[in-house]
Amino acid sequence: MSKKAKASPYLRRPTDPIEVDRDRSVAGLLAKFEATSFQARNLAIAHNIWLNMLEDTCTIVLGVSGPLIPAGMRRLLAWLIRNRYVDVVITDGLTVFHDVHESLGRQHYQGSPLMATSELQSHGITRLYDTLLSEEEVREADEWLRSFVNMQDVTRPYSTRELLNLLGRELAEIASEDGILTAAYKARVPVFCPGVTTSPLIRGIAAGRIDRKSPFMFDVIQDVVEMAHILVGSTNVGGLYFGSSVCSEFVRQAQAAGTVVNARLRPLKYVVHVTLEHGVMWHPVEDADNWSRAAKELRSVTTYCDPTIALPMLVTALTQSAARQVKVRRKPTFTLGRDLAISAA
């Protein structure tokens, strides 16, 4: 028998190999992950931090970016919003466009990343990695968005949050099941879309200006101002980010703007970032005076995992582990008209 290693303050918690257990729930599996390492343990930490947010008096911000809707995540995201596992949504225009696409009764289809793009284009098909959609249906969605925007009051600009709330209301009248925008409209959850001009969402709106001389304009500064007011008006804030850093960067800039309202703005207390982008770093505060407090109270983890794997696991685990927390949690409430107002929990 080999000699036992000399006691060390660093060698206290050994890893515990996972045993096969056919009856274990997803929440139970993540609990087992806590005794492992690498991204398995980080995923377990992400689950526990989300539970901490639900237990705390906390405004939970969900950030989603990339082709999560084409990948089949729409019902999961709508469920989170409808059941108020999250309170604010920040997303990119790609996600919004594909949510609208499916709300209009269209679908995405399974394909292969090996399919030749030229062959698909000859048949009017667009490919997103291994997922396919009809170019004709994409044009129809563009035209529907153009018509919707042309019905708005074009004598004034709109924040993306206001327009997406109106868009959710319109889609709720025709959609057969909830997506992000319709669930958010019904649950009175604000949805922001930073970087709207770099996405398919803008095509129909731009076409409306070109073809019909529609002067519709976005007021993206209002989005930052409203997000800053949410941060200032919340007791605590937690961020859940799935995908690129576009959503977390929006929150970071809103934090900087929020210090104009409150120089001692409380930094985020919880941060979970699930991404495949290695090297992504979260900066919890802009104000250097708050760094010591942030380092003391911040609970954060970056999990390097495909969001289409991590999100279903985390959401399923929460359905099994968070019933008590969700039942008693104190949620912020929002007034979502031309302007946004928040009543903290």
Image (tube, helix red, strand yellow):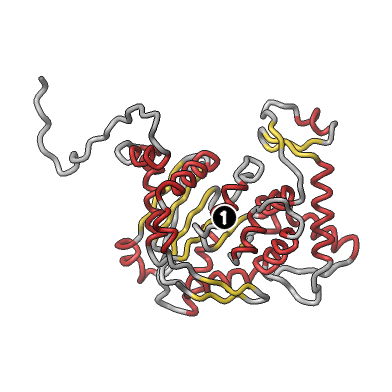
Q: Report x, y in % for residue 290.
A: 36, 69
For residue 192, say whether it is visible. no
Above or below 300: residue 110: above
Nearest the camera: 337 or 42?
337
The residue to which callout 1 is attached is: 246
The residue positioned 37% from the left and 40% from the top of the image is 28
Q: Report x, y in % for residue 300.
A: 38, 54
The residue positioned 77% from the left and 51% from the top of the image is 104
The residue positioned 48% from the left and 61% from the top of the image is 60
Quadrant of the image containing the N terminus: top left
Q: Residue furthest top?
A: 1
Answer with left or right where residue 106 lies relative to residue 343.
Answer: right
Answer with left or right where residue 18 lies relative to residue 143.
Answer: left
Q: Residue furthest right?
A: 212
Quadrant of the image containing the C terminus: bottom left
Q: Report x, y in % for residue 106.
A: 76, 44
The three-letter amino acid code for the residue at tag 1 is Val
For residue 321, say whether it is visible. yes
Count neighbours of disc 1 (C-alpha within 10 A) and say few if under 14, some if 14 to 19, many if 20 or more: some
- Residue 29 lies in quadrant: top left
Nearest the camera: 234 or 77?
77
Q: How many marks?
A: 1
- Residue 109 lies in quadrant: top right
Q: Residue furthest bottom?
A: 261
Nearest the camera: 171 or 111?
171
Q: Secondary structure at mark 1?
A: helix
Q: Report x, y in % for residue 32.
A: 33, 37
Above or below 247: residue 128: above
The residue positioned 81% from the left and 62% from the top of the image is 148
